[in-house]
Structure formats: structure tokens, C-alpha cells
Image (cartoon, coloured by chain):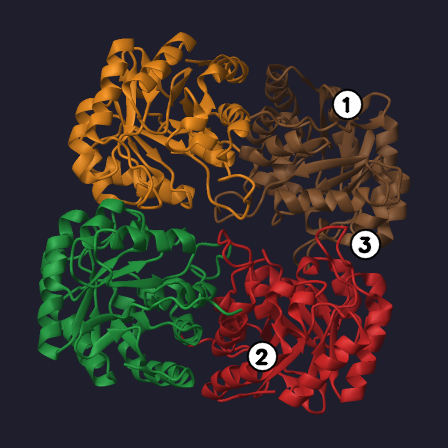
Chain colours: A brown, B orange, C green, D red
Amino acid sequence: MSTPTTPKKPVNVSPGVTLGHQAVILMAGPCAVESYEQMRAVAEAVVHAGGHVLRGGAFKPRTSPHSFHGLGYEGLLILRHVADEFGLLVITEALAVAHVPQVAELADIIQIGSRNMQHYPLLWAVGELDKPVMLKRGFMSTIEEWLQAADHIASRGNEKIILCERGIRTFETATRNTLDTNAIALVKQTSPYPVIADPSHATGRADLVLPAARTAVAAGADGLLVEFHPDPHLALSDGAQSLPLTMLPQFMDEVGRIAQAMGRFLA
Amino acid sequence: MSTPTTPKKPVNVSPGVTLGHQAVILMAGPCAVESYEQMRAVAEAVVHAGGHVLRGGAFKPRTSPHSFHGLGYEGLLILRHVADEFGLLVITEALAVAHVPQVAELADIIQIGSRNMQHYPLLWAVGELDKPVMLKRGFMSTIEEWLQAADHIASRGNEKIILCERGIRTFETATRNTLDTNAIALVKQTSPYPVIADPSHATGRADLVLPAARTAVAAGADGLLVEFHPDPHLALSDGAQSLPLTMLPQFMDEVGRIAQAMGRFLA
Amino acid sequence: MSTPTTPKKPVNVSPGVTLGHQAVILMAGPCAVESYEQMRAVAEAVVHAGGHVLRGGAFKPRTSPHSFHGLGYEGLLILRHVADEFGLLVITEALAVAHVPQVAELADIIQIGSRNMQHYPLLWAVGELDKPVMLKRGFMSTIEEWLQAADHIASRGNEKIILCERGIRTFETATRNTLDTNAIALVKQTSPYPVIADPSHATGRADLVLPAARTAVAAGADGLLVEFHPDPHLALSDGAQSLPLTMLPQFMDEVGRIAQAMGRFLA
Amino acid sequence: MSTPTTPKKPVNVSPGVTLGHQAVILMAGPCAVESYEQMRAVAEAVVHAGGHVLRGGAFKPRTSPHSFHGLGYEGLLILRHVADEFGLLVITEALAVAHVPQVAELADIIQIGSRNMQHYPLLWAVGELDKPVMLKRGFMSTIEEWLQAADHIASRGNEKIILCERGIRTFETATRNTLDTNAIALVKQTSPYPVIADPSHATGRADLVLPAARTAVAAGADGLLVEFHPDPHLALSDGAQSLPLTMLPQFMDEVGRIAQAMGRFLA
């Protein structure tokens, strides 16, 4: 049962925020940046709850060509502006190689989305940077393929890699995806990189996000990427899985107690 | 996000042991009853750790006809004898309708295995009894089918039903199955019956059993069914996923702390 | 690419009907035996189309306890009576060990259903007989587990085994299951037993049954188990996947042409 | 059972080659272009067998960063040169937006690979062209998502779309993927676009490619994308699923007979 110790590679995002150390890092915000007012409301709540990282999508990959595709570069500017106003860090997705320079300029952590986990030119592009990259597991990818995708990034020199388990596709349809907590525990043992979880996509249902966040932390997750929205039923995307900002205190309390049981704390 | 409150139906097994109340109930023991000495060693460790329920298989369903199929009725007698000696309760599987009378006579909780989840004559047979039944989810059954299987039992009058999530079959092969913690959280909300988890089958790897047990409790599980063996590498079945008895204290400690974070305790 | 030749074990059901030889054997009839009139209508159409085997369920396993569960022994008697009247053979399912004697007495081929593929006491019970057994692949079972289930039957002496691929559960929901034609081709190469396919359950949609039947024969299937009903929209079970009897000639024609392209014929 | 007739949109690639008409179009060649000599050997065999389309990869997406990644632009030039020499058409993959102009210039059909099915910037880029695009189904994408991905291409104006079923990821591990013949039949009914199949990736085993090709045609496929190599055990990628060129005549004969049974012919 003993596992060979892998030398860990924590990812330092800012002087106070490191993934893979004692703190469990919350990254909270809406699926899509919709407006300056929306992001200010979120940022205020995140700061008040003790969080440090703001998330929000500017370029949105959508299954149907007829859905809302995000505000683009304007969304990025709003996100950065609001984050600076509140002293927060920013994580956002680079959907294409062409977006990498803009995203790298304005974000503190670059997200590679689930659908892009094996989009190698994109992995190579962020692999050339000296900036934290959060690599989501493909919802159809094995753990081995996920770690190999991380190798694609590292092979170009960038080892500031954060892995993110976001649920896999299974035969079960009562939930959007199946959160693979086994994978979180396994990757913690075998990979040098920190691993976080996205309970919002992994469940697709607001009523399961909080328990899924607790389980991820109990499995050993180093952080959580969670969708919060001022008004989920008005959200332009992913409203069904977004928590209202009013739930943030309960979230911090319940998940924070699990973090403490693990000898850690939520921030 | 509010869910209509389902009137809960806790399952009282003995004066001190109820599934679905504050205690998270540990059911520990080997996959298969192999000998009187083996079971005594396990029972002693379980009692010492503060546990109340002893598990062990007498009739083992095995994928290959050439594998060890259990000691049968003799195994049942050993299990009951040792449990009485140590003041423990017994859970064991009824593999076929023909076994139900014997198992019902000697066990405190009758287990219906994953492969039998839709074996209706067996469900109806235990549905006629006034005895707790633990119904494992089929490893490729949807949550809805699982709850309908419970309906098959309840339709004959027996509502002392304990549901058990034991991992589902997915494309991932690094683990034996994928523990579906979403399902635990969902069933806790929508079903009247208590729900437990089997982290041993859900992972198939001893090194992941403990984290999986923590995640199940964080998801809201009311109990845990865990394989412990005095000497896992000598086990006649499922050795790779059995924990040694020497790990029981660490198990109680780590999982117990998660239970406390949930406002519960492990027993 | 050359595969070691497995000595084949064709299954002789009657002087004129052998599974695993040149003829592709059609087994046609309703999901459930509903009445004498219904079965006569089916039998007449089957004979007229040149078929030899009548199917129909007497004991129906149903996911919900509130669905129609079949006519039981009365259904068996109807099935046998009608088959004899028209000179047809009978295939029907034994759902439980307790049914085996009755089914063995009245049927020419005993069907073991998908949910029972790993119900070992049932496999052992039919393994004691000298009668053809048709073993459906569990919809959640690997090819290896399927062949091992066949070993459970053969281990008791009965090698008159017919394997049946009936679709597996995958993430795809547009069809009830996914017909695994790779499995048909693989089992043809590696197993001594004949293999047939059930395009009705494998698709769950009447509009896909005919193409699925063609593909199964092109993959090498030795027979087809197909749901036909005089009036599918009045069927008490599985109406959505049943073909009307009026489609039988077109079915024989289209599938028959594929059989001919394979150097075989449909009967 | 009658389906509303969808107006079909056959794809004309050259004066003699149209996808979606009576001919079933074979696209044959190695996984990766390795050398001029290799491609000449393949092209000669394809012409001799009566084929019209040569396949070969120049840019290869590989799961591991340490595998052979193809000859790049040089490979494209070899492919075009050899095809012109033998009067063949060319299909090859554009792996990234940056490759689209080169591939569009040199290929007759642009392939979008399975991992890129939801790589929207790439879909939009080929959607701007007036050139046939072959869109592979993601190996864990639903039929609906596949058709929506086609919509992404069509939304930019290009409706010369050929769909390709190449197997889906399931729990079965005896084969690399599970060929979803149900999907072929369903898409034939509901989509305006022609649909082909890739039996090589769908099985991952040379001994199953031929039966899989037969089943695809029996399901209604309008074409086949098949890996052939002069010497599969020396192939730099996908050797285990490549057929030797010496099997081409048997392939044409067996699959051709199924095509004839469908009222079509293989070319």
C-alpha cells in the first residue's frame, strides 16, 4: 500500500496564494462574464468570504453554435479590472491558441478547458509560458491521458501545472457528470502537480454542488473551482449549476470544516 | 435548490445501532469467511476500534467458475458464532433465493449484492421478511433503477432498506470502479432510506480505500462497508482491495474526523 | 491476424434447426405472451415467412414492480400449444431457478436474460440439463465476463450454449443500448459457441431494428432474436421496439440478402 | 416507424466521386505518411483495387508528447504528389487552425479528428471554406453533440460535410472502441449529411477491421476510412489496427458483396 513518494511541485500564484500547500484555494465566480456590475457583486462577496481568486469566462465554448459565446476580450478587461479593484487573482480560459497572448497578459492562471485537454497546439502554446496553467481533465479522458496531456505542457518547459477533475461522462443521467473522487485521490498520490475539483460541472445541479465540494476536499483536493452568480436563474450560461452568492457563507463553513478535518483550511 | 423533504426511514438493527441517525456505522470484515481464527482476529480488532458490525461472505458470487466460492453454511455459522462471542452484529450476503432462510436466521442484516440488484425473485423473497436488507447498487445501474429495485423489496412489505453505493463501471480502468459520490448525495436528498458506501469495491485498490471512505462520509453516507483482513496478501478473494487490520485505528481516526466535521460520529 | 482455430460447437435444436451452421436462424415473436390469439397471429406469420422458432416471454423481469410481469405458467402453455400447432420450436426465458423445470419441459431453447447473466445458481441449474441454453450478454458485462458466465453453464456439463449480444449500456441515450457488433465478430473468432443478436433490445427503437439486424448478420451472427407483435402500439411491454408482423416480409428480404452476401441464408 | 424525409445533401468531391449516392467510397491508406515509397506502394494498391481516395496523416495528434508526430508539411506534399501521380483524391487531417490553409490547398477532403470534434475555432475555420470536410465523431460524444458540431461548421456557410463514426469509448476493453452501428443507421435517417465509418479506430485490432467494415456498410454507411499499410508491423503509428495491402482484394470482395446486398457498390 506504500506509494513511492513523488516530489511535489506546488504552484505559487502570488505571494499569498499557493496551490498544493496547506490552504485549499477557492476559485469562485460566474460561468461567463456578463457585465461589470455582475462581476463587482461577485468579487465583493468573494473577498468578504475570505477568498482570493475570481473566475469568469470571456470566451465560452458552447455545444450549439446558437448559444451565447461570451464577451470576448471585453470580458477579459472587465474581469481584470474588477479583480484589481478588490485585490483578487484571476483565472480564465484560453479557448484557442490565438487567445493565449491576451489571456496570458490579463490572467493569473490560464485555464485549459475539458474539451481542449487533447488540443495539443494549445497545450504547447501555454507550455511556452512562465505562468500557472490549470488543466481540466477531459470528461471522456482516462487519468493516464490526463497526466500525459500535462506532460505535453511540461515538455515545453512550463511545470506550473494545476490539474482539475471536473466529472466524467458515464451512463448515469441523473447528474450531468460523475465526479471522480477516486481520480483526485489517485492523482494526489502519483502526480507531482496539485489537483483541484470543479463540483459545478461535475454535478450540473446546484443542489449537489456543496456536497460534491465537501467530497472533493475529503479526497484531498487542493482547491475548488465553483460557479457562483448573483442571480443564477438569470445567468446567460450554466444557471442550473450555479450557486447564488447568498450561499457563499454556508459553503465556506461546511467545506471549511472538512478542510479542517483534513488538517487544512479553506481560503 | 430546496428539495421537498422526504420523510426519512432510519433502519434500526439493534437497540444501539441505527442506520440513518447521527452515527456513521462501520461494517468491517473480510470479503470471504475463511476460518474461525481469521474471523476472531477481525472481530477483536473491530470491537477494539469501537465498531459494532461484522461483515463476511459465506456464499461468494465469482465471475469465473474456477474461483473460491466460499464456505457456505459453515461460513455462516462461524460468522454468527464469532459475532456473538464479541457482541457484534452480522451482515452477510444472500446470493440466491434458496439461501434466504439460512441467512435470515443467522444474520442481522441481509446483503443483496451488486450482480443481484435486479434479481427480482430474490428481492421479493427478502421483501417478505421483517429484517434489515442492504441493497447494493448494480455497478452499471442508474440511480433510478436502484431506487426501483428498492421498491421491489418494499412492495412486499419490508421497508427496512439500506442502500449501498459501491462504485459504477465507467471507461476509467486505473480503478476497479468509479465511486459515485454524486449518487450518495442525491439519494440522501430524494430517498427515504439510509445510504452507505463500499469504498473497497468502489476503488479495488487498498491505497484508495481510506480517501474513498472519507469522501463517502463527506457526501453524507450513513455507513461504510469496508474489507479488512488480518493478512490481505493471503486473502482467498479480493486481497488487493483489503486493508490490513493494523490500519483500522488510522481509518477510524481519519474518517472519524470527517464524520465530526459533518456533525456526526463514526462507530 | 490469423487466429488459432477454436473447434466450433454448433447447437442442434431439432433435426432441421442448428445454430452455428450455414443457416442464420430467426427467432421471432412478442416480448410477452399476452393471449392465444396474439400468439397464433405471430406463429402464422413466422411460418409463412419461412421461420422456425417462436419466441415469447411468460415470466417478465421488469425494472418497476408496478409493470406487467407476464402470464407465468399459463403463458408457457399457450406458447407451446401454438408452436406445436404450427410446427415451430419455442424459446422462452427462465427468470428464476424455480422456473427451470417448467421451462425445460415446455421450451426447446431456454433463455437466460441479460439481468441474470451473473446469477450463478440459475446458470448452474440450466448447466445440469441436456437442452440448448441461450445466454444473453449482460448489458453491463464485458465480453470476458460473458464467456466466463458461459463457462459456469458448461462447468456443469451442458455445452449446448448459444450466446446472444443484446446491446450494452453506454453514455449514448439516443438509442436504448449500443449494439456491440465488434463483440459479435470477436466472439465468433474466439468462442466455440454460436452467437446470435437481439436487435430489438439493442436499439429500443422500431425504426432501427432492421438496420441493426443487417449489421449483426454482416458481423457474422448465427441467428437473430427479434420482437414482432401483431399490433405494437397495443403491446403490454416493449411496444416501442417491436416491429409489426406486416414488416416480416421486408425484414426477411433485406436481412436475407445480407445473409446471402455472407454465403448463408436466413430461415 | 416512418421518419420524416430529410432532404439529403450528398457531397461531391470530384466529377466521379460523390459521398451519399450509390457508391460506397473507400478511403484507404496509412495512419501516418512516412515516406514517398510507402505512399506509392499504397496508392498503387488502391488504384489496382478500384479505389479513388488516398488517406494519410501529416500532422498526428498523439496522446504522449514522446510519440511520432508526423512529417508535417513535407508529409502533405508527398501525399499530394503521389495522389496526383495515380489520379487519386486526398483526405488528410487539419489538426489546428494554423494548418487549415495548407491542408485546404493540398487536400480534397479536410478531416477533423475525433479529439477536435468540439474544437470550435477549428470548426469555424473549415466552415469558411468551400471544400468537403469530414467530421469525426468524438469518441465520447453523443450523436446530438456530433450533429451540433456539424452545425458549427454549417453555421459559417460550408455544408459539404461528411460525418464519420469511428467508435465510442465504453466499458469494454477487449476492443479499442465500440463501433456504434446504431449511430450510423440513426444519422442516415435524421441528418442531411452522408455518413462514413472508420473500422480501424473503432476496433483497434486488425482481425476485426473487415467484419466491422461489413457491418458499417450493412448499417448504411456511405463510405469507409480504413488504415492499410505496406508492412503493418513496421508502421510508425497504429500498426496493430492496420491491414496489410495484400488484404485489399479480399476486403474489396467481402465488403463489396455487402454493398451489393444493399443495392450499392464499393469503389
Q: Which mark is residue A121?
A: 3
1 vs 3, front mark? 3
For residue A157, above or below residue C55? above
Badge 2 is on which residue?
Answer: D247
C114 left or right of D236 in image: left
Determine the secondary structure under disc 2. helix
Q: Chain of mark 3?
A: A
- Dots 2 and 1 on the same chain: no
Determine the secondary structure under disc 1. helix
Which circle's residue, 1 or 3, is located before the other in the chain?
A: 1
Badge 1 is on which residue?
Answer: A47
Q: Is residue A233 visible?
A: yes
Check disc 3 and give the amino acid type: Pro
Check disc 1 and give the amino acid type: Val
**How far is disc 1 from disc 3 in space, using C-alphas?**
36 Å
* Residue B205 x/y as whole percent: 51, 32
3 vs 2, front mark? 2
Q: Chain of mark 1?
A: A
* Residue C155 x/y as whole percent: 25, 51
Question: Relative to the observer, which residue lies in front, D241 or B50?
Answer: D241
Q: Is residue A112 visible?
A: no
Quadrant of the rendered image containing residue A52: top right
- Residue drawn at point x = 21 percent, y = 58 percent: C158
